[in-house]
Image (cartoon, grey):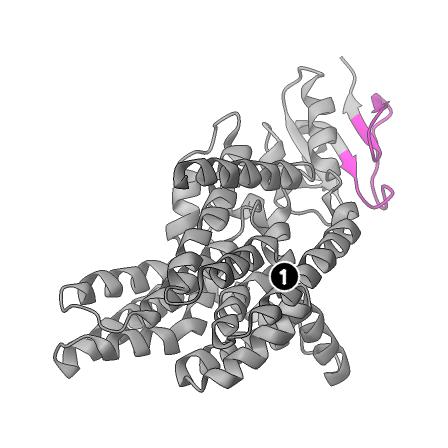
Amino acid sequence: MRFFLSLILEAYAVALASMQSLGGVHTDEAKYLLNIPYPHPPLARWLLGLTDGWSHQEFFWRIVFASLCVQAVWLVWALTLGMPRRQRRYVALMWLCASALVLQAGTVMMAPLTALQGLVLLWLVSKIELKEEWAGWVGLFWLVSLFTAYQAILYLPLMVAIIKKVRIHRMAKFLYIVVPVLLLMLYTFTNPLALAAIMIKGDQGTHTTLVEKVAGFLQVWMLSGSLILSVMGTIGLARSRQWELILSFVLVSAYLFLARFDYNAILLLPLLVTGMLFYSRQWIFQVVLVIEIALSVVIVWRSIPALHPTPARAVMQVIADQHKLGDVLISGSFGHEWQYESSFPIYRYTQALVPHAQAIVCLDACIGVKIPPEWQSLGKTPMPVFERRK
């Protein structure tokens, strides 16, 4: 029975990955797939970079990420141990149907991985007692989490609660928690690109008003649990009176308030699902699940326009079909997805680079671009593209 359910879940994961593949590779995904050294620590993007050059690299990792998120429902099932079986099913379905999971599971981003690491920590918190030999593995997992994405530090209260349960020397507990954090700080301060990315991210919210920040946070909070799970999960966490759950929720919420990005909504999902464990009446689970499914359908439907393909893939395919050699120059602001889709070197347009180029792509209506008279326009492209004549 479990094997059959796993197959159904895997089909669901492939469907989510296929949905995300419709939009092609976006700039943040391209950074990780190309192992560009910012903004996150190197572990996960290094692993992704090992597959650079695979013809189906993008879709392979979409399936891997989606499978991890969907199959994590078994961990949610373990988290609900001790509850009535029907209520456990409801909570598991809440995880699978949350809009944040549906919209993020198939993306090649660090946020889904960090959310899964948070879910693992929540499961470890739920364990009544941890054996001494678990301490090393938990410390290693904490190190891996921190070197996957900086946002893992938001789950620090969970890590503290876990290590407190292990019967080892106090100094050992301190080292298991602090040494990985110190190693992350050492990496950060020896990596100028990481520091610059942190500064840029921090500066992005300085020009928004308090009202805009609150509205932005509420939008991400609602997205994380399709509104109804967001509300009930938050209330459940407050009812838990467990400091590690509440403090982790506060830290993640504070981060979302300061850095409002929809793709980070999934960071709250493990905590919201955990908040449902502190209800006992079955009708609450039934009502929350039904409303969550309905709202998720609406939210996903409204998000479909964002899944349309980026122009990078179509443009670079047309240029590649010309079978020429040389650089591709782009006029205007462009992201790393252009690098990912191109088999040729990509540079920002300058007149000095034109003699070595095979094509010029205009993202800004060719403002300031001088097209040589011997060049010709390529048709059937989403934006103006010019190529050198044969």
Name the one closer to the observer, 33 or 145.
145
Q: Is residue 98 above or below residue 181?
A: above
Residue 243 vs residue 315: left or right? left
Residue 384 vs residue 156: left or right? right
- Tally of numbered discs: 1
- Circle 1 SS class: helix
Q: Is residue 322 magenta?
A: no
Residue at the far top: name it: 390
Q: Position of residue 87 (x, y in %)?
A: 50, 63
Q: Amino acid at mark 1?
A: Leu
Residue at 81% across / 28% down in the picture? 386
Q: Is residue 378 above or below residue 264?
A: above
Name the one closer to the observer, 120 or 316.
120
Magenta span: chief secondary structure: loop
Can you say which quadrant of the picture contains the N terminus?
top left
Tell me where residue 48 sits by quadrant. Answer: top left
Tell me where residue 299 sits by quadrant. Answer: bottom right
Q: Position of residue 234 (x, y in %)?
A: 57, 77
Q: Position of residue 95 (x, y in %)?
A: 54, 58
Residue at 71% across / 80% down in the picture? 214
Q: Is residue 105 visible?
A: yes
Q: Is residue 382 above or below residue 40?
A: above
Tell me where residue 11 sits by quadrant. Answer: top right
Q: Position of residue 322 (x, y in %)?
A: 71, 16
Can you say which quadrant of the picture contains the C terminus?
top right
Q: In the rendered image, which residue does mark 1 sit on?
A: 289
Residue at 45% across / 73% down in the picture? 154
Magenta stretch bounds: 361-386
